[in-house]
Image: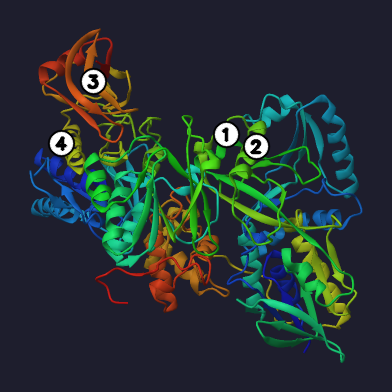
Amino acid sequence: MTRIIVIGAGVIGCSVARELAAFDAEVFVFEKGNDVAVGTSKANSGIVHAGFDAHPGSNKAKFNVAGAKLFPALSKELDFPYKNNGAMVLNFSPEGTDKLKELLAQGAENGVEGLRIISGDEARELEPEVSKDVYNALYAPTSGIVGPYEMTIAYAENAAANGVKFCFNRKVDSVVKKPSGGFIVKADGKDYDCDAVVNCAGVHADDVNNTVCRQKEKIIARKGEYMLLDKSYGYLTYCTLFQLPTAMGKGVLVSPTVHGNIIVGPTADDVPDKDNTDTTVDGLNKAFKLASVSVPALTKRMIITQFSGIRAHSEKNDFTIGESDTEGLFNALGIESPGLTSAPAVAKYLSGLIAEKYNLEKNPSFNPKREGIKQFSSMTDKEREEIIRKNPLYGKVVCRCEVVTEGEIVDAIHRVPGAVDLDGLKRRTRAGMGRCQAGFCTPRLMEILARETGRKMTEISKKGTGSELLVGKTKGEKL
Amino acid sequence: MKRNLVIIGGGPAGLAAAIGAYDEGERDILILEREPNLGGILNQCIHNGFGLHTFKEELTGPEYASRFIREVKARNIEYKLNTTVIKLSGEKRVTAVNETDGLMNIDARAVILACGCRERPRGAINIAGCRSAGIFSAGTAQKLVNMEGYMPGKEVVILGSGDIGLIMARRMTSEGAVVKAVVELMPYSSGLNRNIVQCLNDFNIPLKFSHTVVDIKGNGRVKSVVIAPVDEKLNPIMDKAEEISCDCLLLSVGLLPENELAKQAGIALSPVTGGAEVDENMMTLSDGVFECGNVLHVHDLVDFVSEESAHAGKCAARYIAGKIESGSERIKIGTFGGVRYCVPEYVYRGKASEGIGLKMRVNNVYRKVRIKVVADGVEIAGKNKQIVTPGEMETLSLTAEQADKLKNASDVSVGLEVK
C-alpha cells in the first residue's frame, strides 16, 4: 500500500490527511508538538475570507474562493463552528474610494459574489458601533467566521477515524530521497520509510523543503498579536470589520468570534524567531489603537486575554502548492492568510494530485461524517436533562465561565487524537477560555486529566513537556 | 419545583444569609453550592485572622466557616452541593444542574445571590510576554497549595499587593519557596496593613510600590519576569527595568464580583462596585432578588460579609412574609470627596424603624479625615479617622433616628472631609 507521511498537524496537514483518508493509502501525520493545531492554526483571526483581497490568478485567490464555498457544507459534515456573518472593509477618506473600487473589481474577477460599496451611513446602520469617520465601505456578504482550532481538530478526528495515524512529539529533521524511489523521513534519530511526503510544516515548511529540494524556499515569520474581549461586549460588531489593506497584510480587524467574543488584531511584524509567540507591549498597543479607529467604543477594560500567532509568509507572497522539484514531495508552503479559508480546497487539490500520481483507489469504508463534542452550554434544557440522565458527568460544571461540564472534558480526553494537556482541553471544550481565564477550573481540569490518563498531577502540563504546571508537593505531602 | 427562598452560593455570604432568613422565621430555604463542600473560598484560607469582629477570636478560614455550617445544619436548612446554577430569569426562576437531580427549575419567591467574586486574570491587565506555565492567579495557587498539596513554583514573584497576594507570599515562603518580590503598581497597597506586616515584613520579602511587570519570559515554563517602575501616570519607565529570574508569577491584581447570573436576569449593576445596586434591605432593583457578600462588593474582612449577609437573609424572609414594602419611592445616596462608592446605593423613603449600616471605599490614601453623611446640606452622622486607604473598607452605622433623617431628606450623600 502507498505510504504517505504528512508533516505538520495544523489545519493544512490535518485537512490533507483527512482528504487522503478518502483513498486507499497508509497515511501518517508527523507533528513536532504534542497535539494538533498548536502553531499558526491555533492563533489567527478565524476568518473565512470572501476572497477579494488576493491578486487575481494567484494561488491565494484561487484557493480562497474555492475554499470559502466549501465551508457551509463542510462545517456541518465535520461539525465545527462556522458562521456567515459578512464583512466590511472600512475606508476613512474620499481618496480611499478608488482603493475600495479596486478591491471590488478584484473580488468580482476572483468570482466573489455580492460585493458592493456602501456609504458610511449605511455601514453605521448595519454596525452602529462603527466610527463616524468611516467614509464608505466595501460590504462582503459571503465572508464568515470559523473556529480555527475546532476546524483543525475536526479534520484530525475524522482523519483518525478513517485510519490516519497521528504521531506527536515527532520532529522531522530531514527528508531524504531514496535512489530506488520514495523517501526516508528522519525524525528524532529514527528513519521512517514512505512513498510520498506532504510538507505542511507551516512556518518551518521551508526547512523541510530545503533538506531535499533543489529549489530553496524561504519562509518569513510574521507575527500577529491579538486581543480577545469579554463576551459581554459581543454587541460591538456582528460583521467582521477590516480596514483598507496594506503591504503587510489585511490590517487590523475587529470581528466577532464564533463563540461570541470580539477579537481585535492582528499586527504584522517580521520576527527572527519562528516559534516565539510572546506578546509585546508595543504590539498590543498598536493593535488596540488601530482597532479603535474602526470601533471607537473599545476600551482596554473589555480585554480578557492576548495572544500572538506567526504567519508563514513566503518571499513569493503566494502559496506554493503542488509537487516540488523532487518527485513525490508535495508542498503546501507559504500558507498565510487566507490559508485557513483555503485549507479545504488545498486539501482536496493536493489529495487529488497524489491519488492520481499513485493511482490510489477510493477508500470504500471512508466515512466523511464526524460528530463534535456535545456542548452543554448550547443545549436546550430538555437536551441537558436527557444527557445528564444518560451520563451524570454532564451535570457537573467544571468551567463556570463557559459552562463546560465534566462530561465534555472526559469526552475530549478520550477522543482520537485527544486532549493531553490543559491547552488541548481548552481548544476542544473552551474550558478556561472565559473571563476568569482558568482561575477556578485549572486545579479541577488537572485532576480530571490526571485521573483519565493515569498520570500524576505533577505530570500535567499546559502545553506539553517543559510546561508542567506544578513543581512538586508541599512539605507535608509525599510524592 | 417551588421554593420560598433560594440562596445561590454556600460560602460565608450564603451561609449567613440562610441563618439570617431562618431566624427571621423563614423555613423553606434552599442553598445551592457548586463546590463539594459548604464554606466557599474560606476552605482554602487556612491562615488565621478570621472572626476577630464576630467571635472576638482569631480563627482560620475553615474554622470560621465551620461555625456557620454548624448553625445551618442545626437549623436543618436544606442545601445541595456540587450544584451549579446556570440560569436566573427575571421572574426568579433558578435553573441548576447536578449529577443526581439532573436539571432543576426552581421558582423562588425570593432569591439571594451570594456567589462571591473571582480574580482578575492576567489578560485583563494586559501584561505582555510569553504564555507559559507558571502564571497563576494567587487564589488558584492558594487552592493548589492548601487544598491539593502541590507547589506551583519555587521562585516566585507576586504582582499586586491585594490580601491574597500577601497571604500567598507568606504561604509560599513557609513551604520553602523563595518569594523574590511583591510588586505593586500603586504607591500604596490594596491589602490590609496587618497583612503587609505579618506576611511580608516578618519574612523580609521586598514590596516594591509603583512598579509593575512589563514582560514575562520563558519557553514552556516561566524563567523570569521583567519589572519596571512607573511614573505618575502609571506608565512604565522602561530604561529602569530589571529582570528577576523566577519560575512562577502570581497575580493578585483585584477581585471582581461574579455577577453573570444577575446580568442574565437583567439586574442593574453598579459600574463602580461591579455588584448590583441595592437598597438598605440588600434588595437589588429587581423585586425579590437580594445580593450580599463579595458578589455585591468586594470586602476585606469576612466578618463584614457575614454581618451584611445575615441582614440580607433577614430582609429576604421579611419580603417573603410581605413585611417589606417594595416599589415605593427610593432615594440614591450620592458620594463626594474621595468616596468611590457606598453600599447600599439606595434607601427607601418613609419611616426608619431600625438603623442602617453604610459601607464604603475611598479612592486614595487620605489622612485626618471625617467620614460623614450629609442630608440636605446638614451632617447627620460622621466619624473621624486618622487614615483611610483604598485597601480598607470603611463603615458607618446610622441609628434609627439618623436613618430616619436619611430617609426623609431630598438630597443625601456620603463623603470625606479632609481636615
Disc on the earlier residue, 2 or 1: 2
Q: Give how far apart the Cα atoms at labels 1 and 3 are.
A: 38 Å
Of badges 3 and 2, nearer the viewer stands 3
Q: Is residue B152 above or below residue A130?
A: below
- The front one of B363 and B111 is B363
At x 34%, y 35%, the residue is B188
Q: Is residue B314 above or below residue B370?
A: below
Query: Can you give x and y, in whole percent of width and height, for residue A164 in the image?
Result: 67, 79
Left or right of residue B413, residue A310 in this image: right
- The front one of B102 and B246 is B246
- Per the image, label 2 sits on a secondary structure element best described as helix
Q: Give how far apart the Cα atoms at labels 4 and 3 are.
A: 33 Å
Q: Residues within 10 Å of mark 1 (few under 14, many from 20)?
A: many
Disc 3: which residue: B369
Q: Give how far apart the Cα atoms at labels 4 and 1 are.
A: 42 Å
Q: Residues within 10 Å of mark 4 (few under 14, many from 20)?
A: many
Placement of the N terminus of chain A among the 4 image quadrants: bottom right
The answer to whether the residue labelled 1 contacts the one labelled 3, judged by CB atoms less than 8 Å apart, is no
- Tell me the quarter of the picture where residue A3 sits: bottom right
Q: Give how far apart the Cα atoms at labels 2 and 4 are.
A: 49 Å
Disc 1: which residue: A298
The answer to whether the residue labelled 2 contacts the one labelled 1, judged by CB atoms less than 8 Å apart, is yes
Disc 2: which residue: A291
Q: Are marks 2 and 4 on the same chain?
A: no
Left or right of residue B60, residue A440 in this image: right
- Tell me the quarter of the picture where residue B280 sits: top left
At x 47%, y 50%, the residue is A434
Of badges 1 and 3, nearer the viewer stands 3
- Per the image, label 4 sits on a secondary structure element best described as helix
